[in-house]
Image (spheres, coloured by chain):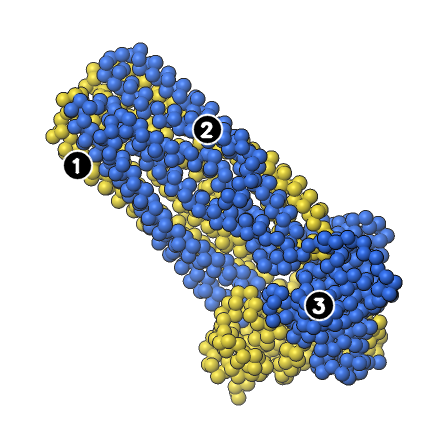
Chain colours: A blue, B yellow
Amino acid sequence: MRKLAKYLKNYKKQLFLGPLFKLTEAVFELIVPVVTAMIIDNGVLKNDAGYVWKMGGILLLLGVVGLICALICQYSASIASQGFGTVLREDLYRHINSFSHKEIDKFGTPSLITRITNDVNQLQFAVAMLIRLVIRAPFLAVGAVVMAMMIDIKLSVIFLVVTPIIAVILYVIMSKSVPYFKVAQKKLDRISGISREGLSGVRVIRAFSKQETEEARFLKASTEQADISIRVGKLSALLNPLTYAVMNIGIVAIVWFGGFRVESGGMTTGEVTAFVNYMTQTYLALVVVANLVVTFTKAAASAARVNEVLQTETTIKDPQIDENITLDEREKNGPKIFFDNVSFSYVGKDSDKYALKDLTVSVKKGETVGVIGGTGSGKSTFVNLIPRFYDISKGKIIIDGKDVRDYTIKALRSKIGVVPQGSVLFSGTVESNLKWGNPDASYEDMVKALKTAQAYDFVEKLPDGIKTKVTQGGKNFSGGQRQRLTIARALVRNPEILILDDSSSALDFATDARLRKAIKNDIKETTVFIVSQRASSIKYSDKIIVFDHGEAVGIGSHEELIKSCAVYREICLSQLSEEEVNGK
Amino acid sequence: MKETVKRLLKYTKKYNAFIAGAFFSSVISVSLMLYGPILVGEAIDNILDNGIVDHSGMIPILIRLIFTIAGTAVFQWLMAFCTNKVAYKTVQDLRVDVYAKINRLPLKYIDGHAHGDIISRIVNDVDQVSEGLLQGLTQLFTGIVTIIGTLLFMLSINGFITLVVVVITPLSLFVASFIAKRSHKMFVKQQATQGELSGYIEELMGNQKIVKTFGYEEKAVEGFREINNRLYVCGQKAQFYSSLTNPSTRFVNGIVYAAVAVIGSIYALSVNQTLFTVGEITCFLTYANQYTKPFNEITAVVTQVQAAFAAANRLFEILDEKEVVDDGKVEIPGIVKENGDKQTFSLSIKNVYFSYIPGVPLIENMNVEVAPGERVAIVGPTGCGKTTIINLLMRFYEVDKGSICVGGINIKDMPVDSLRSMFGMVLQDTWLFNGTVKENIAYGRPDASEEEIIEAAKAAHADYFISRLPHGYNTVISEDGGNISQGQKQLLCIARVMLADPPMLILDEATSNIDTRTEIYVQKAFDEMMRGRTTFIVAHRLSTIKEADIILVMKDGKIIEQGRHEELLKRGGFYAELYNSQFAGS
């Protein structure tokens, strides 16, 4: 948690003033019972009405000053905690943005999102509590005990007995019920899981008329959740009655032994009353302390999760060396992209579990490369290495004669347009989505890209054309339309290298064919990679790379591979008719 | 609001005994709790001054006090137990009702609402209701009893000072509501901004890889900072305003306390001290504190209860949705033939009109006649309405006009379950639940024997990979189905249909995400399954299309051509164009 302290450094003033004023208020609160005792002893018992009024005025004054102190404290707390959260969130977000795919994969997106929202909120809350209560509550508890000691040291022994007992009860019950809360949360997750299944599988459930089975499953899960909640409830409900009882036994002891003290002349009656008040105060303060412990335990967990993100450094960094390495002519006229004996493992540099192994392939400028293979064969891994989303374990990847690691990341990626799997659009308009590819794109540029991507026809028909609103995830477009728009987005970039990662799967074969044709004709200079499961999508490529278990088992044209590559032949025969395989 | 309370009460009715128990316990515990200070006061009255302390007089009072404390503690616990039980059991019923209701809602509702939203209602909103019920019941009961009780106790001691307390206390309510009104506005704004920020993070971070691809990092941070700064402004205000409540009400309590101390003392001075003792002042002060507390607590709970009502309303919204109509009675005769085999049926679609959105017609005057055992291939470009036909056949959606008949009987006249049991369905987005492979295959026939299950798996070409799984047929399929591939999932779904052995089929050929080798098996399994069964198949493979008895060519929701492969090719229409484009290549 200490590492996050730097985010508080702009709020030193608030961190100092807040607790200070809260403390002042607490002091006044402690004085109140003393004043009351004085009213009784000096006013009522001595028949002095003027004294009563005077002291009453002091009580009121204490209240007003206390209120002002509290307000200053709350104000400081709100500034410091919200400010802390704001700065931390921005820093986290910025830091996450520097992550490469490897770090993002490591944490997982949902986890990163929870960390930047819930965990930061939790910490923010803890900062507010820190300012408001951390000094105050223990001070009130200790202060009440000290005040009692000052009044009468002998009678205050009761405090020294009762306070630890209450503390122990608080600790035991809380530590016992926390694990139950975790179980209850798990049961709740189960309910959510069953609901999710029920909704995503609604057609199958109804097709088999299994609604009742599903309901029974749900009933079981929700009964378990209710039962466990009731069980925790029973346990944590012990807290109040037990501590209440202990405190009141303390009061009984105060009255009984206080009687002896008054009898022997060591105390006054008013002081016994004050003792009773201090006991109540200590009790209330201890309850607050217990809650604080819970808050800070949660915050510590959040802090650890946030720190974990902040301490993770991205593995993919810009090169230190001078960017402008002069290339000799021979390299300039060499291959556009050259994979030189490349191996890559997701697990780590030294692992034997290669996702891609000993790949050597050379691609010329303007070539179209088809990439095919089963799921997990290494297709996507291959294309993800080109924009340096991951760093390779062995070998070299050369683009335009230069190792990808010698480019700045910005310079490298500006050459490349990627259409990733799972076509995602962002909320905004069609236009704003296209401008992701190139913020300076003109209307004509966008139309051109849309036309090549086979998206112009339907975009044109939209009531607002390219100004049409896109909802989150692009849900207001069909799968095929989304796919074509994401392709257009990449084309707006005018990329030297275009990567289509299984991005025509939702297109029917006619559109798919038109798309391939347009790419071939419209952007002749661009080197294109088409990753697909469909043989028909890649069979006309200049070069086809066939992947199987991380290895390229065949590189060549359709005609060559049909003859030489068993895996490729098998794939084709399973998808295409005889005449198609043998081509026309 | 009134309506919401009424409906919630209907749910709590079952647990009236516990509610009564909670109320009874709170009356007793609060009364005893209030009685305590009186006893303390009486005990202190035995301590008058140096040497004038009556310990023997104290003993019976203190013994009574100890019993009072014990009683308070016991009934406090009982009260908590009862409210817990009411709250959790009530929402359990509510939750189960909502889930069951969803099973009876038309697919139109489920398709039309974000699943995340529905799940959040079932999980979070129900939780909110239970929290509200719990806090509401607890604070309401103890609050009311405390206020009435303290009033009575105070009155029994001294009417005049009671009046002082009663007059001043509502001030804290007034102050609290004044602040609440102001901070509420800020809260709403804060919530909205927080939501906006979460949405932004979710959208951009959820697609971080695209952000990287397009080098959009700086822009993303800029957008983030803009929302984040706005969140700071309204967050700080909301936090500050709302944190005013506590000090302010405490201030009012302080005033009450001071007033009681002063007025009580002056009163004690002005009358004979046997009428108003020092001990009584002490216990009056305690009461003044206790009397004001429920006011603070109730104001604190109000927001929670309000949130609970809002949540309950969202649940009732689901419960009030119109359910699917299922009043058909006619069963189709002779599904199982005398030799035990199942008979397949004819299917006719006559003058059918359908639209998802009223006023935007999709299917208009559709007519298809399918003889028993025929194979119907549906083809057409993406988003042309192929799945709509499945929706109508399975009666997931109702036709607007016209009729669909199976074996000559209008599907509207059949019980929905009978209709659906006649169709075996394998869709592209496969669905398996979090259970074992065996359970998933036996989903449609839970009574199937082990042999039957394996036989179905073999027929679906799934046996070979199942037997290679770590626990074979007892392998548990994880929640996201991550431990088996997409193609294998599809094979399991086929096995599931094989086992159920329905007389008719609805299939959707997968195009993507299937391992090419597995795909061969899927294809074989499909072929075997279709034999002798009337089949509708959303086709992507040419071989499937060529072998179909009827090809329905769809475009923009309409069937524009219908016939056999050769006929359609000859016609030279849209189908011919589609078909040729496959060969046109580059």
Q: Are marks 2 and 3 in contact (CB under 8 Å)?
A: no
- From the viewer's perspective, is residue B265 above or below residue A239? above
- Front residue (pair A242, B70): A242
Mark 3 sits on what residue? A395
Same chain, labels 1 and 3 = no
Mark 2 sits on what residue? A20
What secondary structure is marked by label 3? Answer: strand
Q: In the image, which is nearer the foreground, mark 2 or mark 3?
A: 3
Label 2 amino acid? Leu
Q: Are marks 2 and 1 in contact (CB under 8 Å)?
A: no
Specify whether residue A418 is in view. no
What secondary structure is marked by label 2? Answer: helix
User: Residue A287, percent across and down?
Assistant: 36, 39
User: Residue B474, percent across and down?
Assistant: 48, 75
Mark 1 sits on what residue? B63
Q: CA distance from mark 1 to mark 3?
A: 88 Å
Q: CA distance from mark 2 to mark 1?
A: 44 Å
- Front residue (pair B18, B45): B45
For label 1, the crowd category at 10 Å Cα-Cα, with few meaning under 14, some 14 to 19 and many 20 or more, is few
Specify whether residue A239 is in view. yes
For label 2, the crowd category at 10 Å Cα-Cα, with few meaning under 14, some 14 to 19 and many 20 or more, is many
Residue at image coords 33%, 14%: A53
- Front residue (pair B404, A241): A241
Residue at image coords 19%, 19%: B274
Label 3 amino acid? Gly
Judged left or right of residue A392, residue A363 is right
Q: CA distance from mark 2 to mark 3?
A: 62 Å
Label 1 amino acid? Ile
Q: On the image, which quarter does residue A134 sit in?
A: top left
Q: In the image, which is nearer the foreground, mark 1 or mark 3?
A: 3
Chain under numbered label 2 = A
User: Residue B63, percent across and down?
Assistant: 17, 36
